[in-house]
Amino acid sequence: MTVQGIGAAVQRREDLRFITGVGKYTDDISIPNQLYCYILRSPLAHANIRNIDTSEAKSAPGVVAVFTGADIDASGAGGLPCGWLVTSRDDTPMKEPKHPILATGKVRHVGDPVVAVIAESLQQARDAAERVKLDLEELPAVVNMKAALQGGTAVHEEAPDNMCFDWELGDKAAADEAFGRAAHVTKIDLINNRLIPNAIEPRAAIGQYEAGTEEYTLYTTSQNPHVIRLLMGAFVLSIPEHKLRVYSPDVGGGFGSKIYHYAEEALVTWASKQIGRPVKWTAERSESFLSDAHGRDHVTHAEMAFDADGKAIGVKCETLANMGGYLSTFAPCIPTWLHGTLLAGQYATPAVYTNVKAVFTNTVPVDAYRGAGRPEATYILERLMSKAAQEMGTDQAELRRKNFIQPSQFPYQTPVAVVYDTGDYEPALNKALEVADYSGFEARRSAAKAKGKLRGIGVASYIEACGIAPSSLVGALGARAGLYEAATVRVNPTGSVTVLTGSHSHGQGHETTFAQVVADKLGIDIEQVDIVHGDTDKIPFGMGTYGSRSIAVGGTALVNALDKVIEKGKKIAAHLLEASAEDITFEDGAFTVKGTDKSKAFGEVALTAYVPHHYPLESLEPGLEETAFYDPKNFTFPAGTYVCEVEIDPKTGFTEIVSFAAADDFGNVINPMIVEGQVHGGIVQGIGQAVLENAVYDDNGQLLTGSYMDYCMPRADDVPSLKVHTMPGTPCTHNPLGVKGCGEAGAIGAPPAVINAIVDALKEYGVDHIDMPATPEKIWRAINSASKPMAAE
Amino acid sequence: MYSFDYVRPSSVAEAAQALAGGDATLIAGGHTLIPTLKQRLASPKTVVDISQLSELKGIRRDGNSLVIGAGTTHAEVAASPEVRSSIPALAHLAAGIGDAQVRHRGTIGGSVANNDPAADYPAAVLGLGATIVTDKSQLDADSFFTGLFSTALQPGEIITSIRFPIPEKAGYAKFEQRASRYCLVSVFVARMPGGIFSSGDVRVAVSGAGQNGVFRVSEMEEALKSNFAPSAVSGITVPASGLMSDMHGSADYRAALITALAERAVEAAQA
């Protein structure tokens, strides 16, 4: 490790521009002659569109155009595609209804875009939108998933029973056999609450068409500009990819919600050609609540079978997963391949079976949100483990320890398709228990009781699959894209380096961590390294950032490109040093002839490559620029244990999170400070899901939590000072950096740790489960519905 | 937001004149008005900004009363040595409103005039039996708050100050609605100075819970008059039937919170 290389806690280079307000976000970009788009959205959850009268709006001051779904249909544009095909257990493909850019025929959720009003100013567009006469015939809203499956009203006629797919994974017969011989079975019904992502920067898009060259540019708040270029160009607007540039400049957070191809992106791009002027749209915050894809929203029944020794022998789950009103880009893969495959957890349970039914409802579409399927799987398993421990009178940490996959078992084939390459779970459990002072807990519980408070402690051991993903594998599972990553290392003549990466930073700190990898490999200062991302006209075709994949997949592409640079550099140096390339070593920024003091600095070799006066031109091209595409061999499997401690005021039900300890195995770490920051953010989002956040719809499909007045995001004073520990860990075995990814762990492991702690605090009242978010009222009600404490002192 | 005319008068009299023009609204801190305007739920022709009027500013002791100018921000009340020494519970209340940004913009007059059922200040105004002084009259707290977002103010009438009698003891306890951090329930308890042969009057006011906004709990007041201790109120519950019920708190939960918070307010008053 050097002060700037791999493993160093280098301060984030990008933060200066962000915290001084000179970052450049999509909404900061204004193009001469640009128009503004206001989108009129459905006020109803479910309705037939009888008529849309735009005549008055069209003649309003400043209005340039008013478009409806009919205009888009007439132009021949397609609907928004879904990027993942899931096949039901009866081998039929999922129902894949059309997802129009602007609603046609019906509206299917509050916030469904219906009319685009484009004017010289945003104010004029809004004024004109009020003159649109929307004649809607209200239909019964489908909100509750169980009711939706019972038929009646259909959200889409292609799915009369509102079922998108009915999927399964695992060996049901083996699971049934295990349950048949179980000494103890723990059962649970739980809800994984719907969340609204709330990136700090709302989505925005600017479409621009150049008539002279027939080229389009889309500026957008995307986590993966090439994916948007491919989907929108090829499937929606039929724009040849070489005529379409998608550019995501600085992006203020995504958490998954900016992966997808959204209607507004296609709309402004399409409209810019229709009108011949650039068109800009920026979401208002209330619009974000109604149009950004939501997360989670599962209803699950799960059971876990144990033998007489307390060894888990089987897991069975049945889940309803809400898809919302349309299929968002990757929605089908979240509750299936990113969820079912994690249901072994850290445990050597031999038989696991899960069935997932995906349901259309008249709500905002649901897709990946930080963790994406893995938090839901972890929540099921980790609630089952702690509930089982409570039922069997065993310590919750010891029950986990007893069931861990042992280090000698890796690589470990789970009963749910994936192979864990490496891991060692007990050290992280021990560390988390030590940091949390688990052994001293009962004394703290007694001390709290003496002052009238209820204390509880909760353990959760999570696993996640990151570094997505091997293309051939995901292709077999229904992905309509490859999931490799690309990097170009461009060594400039004076020895500085420009990296063009397909990974996309929207808060993660790639401009620092990727530069650290370059600095480490080439032995140059990180100030000599520039990380370029987000612009399809500059970067090689890359798949972007999500699923904690940047360092594991994008980082590997970068390392492979750097290795090519070094290999070529050795040939150039060999020529300059009159030696054979095999005899050249590269270390600390110098090419040296083995066993001699003859050497050339990296900068000299770079200059020679571009000023090839003394250069083996007959056998080697000039220049020093290399590209690598890397397709991962497997997922990576970060894992760890979290311990949460809470104190509850029984009179009000208020829960204070008094302590939170985390021990994570991320394999090797590039920048421990950035990793710690990622874990902090993830844990706070997990605490938010556990006790604060909830998207609530009424029976008519109106979103009741449509603003920060009612939707509670976690704030700094809602969480304690987190005690985060990164384990020396088990390096990933199949990528050169040995890295696994850390972006989602906190949001995956925290919710069950918090709920396990709350249930533990309430156990004397006979409480064995409480659904998220565990609000003060729910807790107060749980206490008050118990006749009296069961174990009153 | 729709467009509107913005005027900034240089006196209360000028402000009243601007209001009299019709279809005009006052703005002080703007915490209720601006979100309403942004959502196009209000479209006044004129917005009259009184936030800079010096005659509405300031905090002074006047005999047995504390007089706070209507334009005084929550942060100024919270930090005022005069408030902290004469009615510390009021400074504590102000320090817990919203967040730092809210407290530096929002004003006491704006909060009282708006009478949001989940606001903090109405509990103190009613709990202390304050007098609302306007450019036209003086209104007592018991008849001032007339329902959700409604008060005894006449159209065009401007609050200039609030006159709080200085209590012997007072305490405030609040349970936040966690998203908005408004009061899910809050309770203000005050005991006024007694005479030589009588104990002082006790007032208990509840915000956040009532279907008609802030209200007093006479049963608790009676109990505290004879025994000013948390235990005096712990057996008293307010009927849930008159309380608000929404996704953040059902009526029976709010009723339980009123009792718990009344105990804590008394405890705070004794501290």
Image (cartoon, helix red, strand yellow):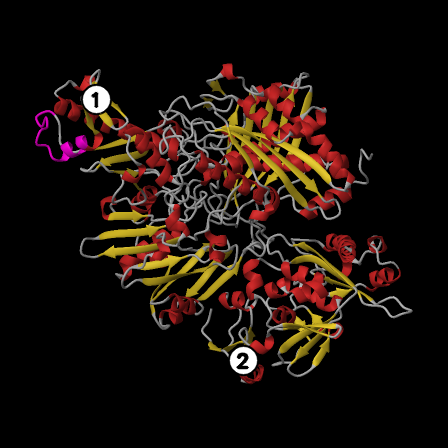
Question: Horizontal placement of A315 versus A228: left or right?
Answer: right
Query: Which quadrant of the rendered structure holds the C terminus of chain B?
Result: bottom right
The residue marked by circle 2 belongs to what chain? B
Image coordinates of residue A287 in percent, x first then y, are: 47, 56
- Which residue is depicted at the point 34% across and 48% down? A248
Q: Is residue A77 something one can see in this rendering?
A: no
Question: Horizontal placement of A314 versus A522: left or right?
Answer: right
Q: Quadrant of residue A173?
A: top right
Image coordinates of residue A451 in percent, x first then y, are: 77, 42
Marks 1/2: CA–CA distance: 83 Å
Look at mark 1 in the image and give the residue it sits on.
A592
Look at mark 2 in the image and give the residue it sits on.
B23
Write down the region rendered in magenta.
Answer: A604-619
Is residue A615 in the magenta section? yes
Mark 2 Cα-neighbour bin, 10 Å: few <14, some 14–19, many ≥20: few
- Which residue is depicted at the point 29% across and 44% down? A234
Question: Horizontal placement of A372 versus A244: left or right?
Answer: right
Please tell me whether mark 2 sits on a helix, a strand or a loop: loop
Is residue A174 in the magenta section? no
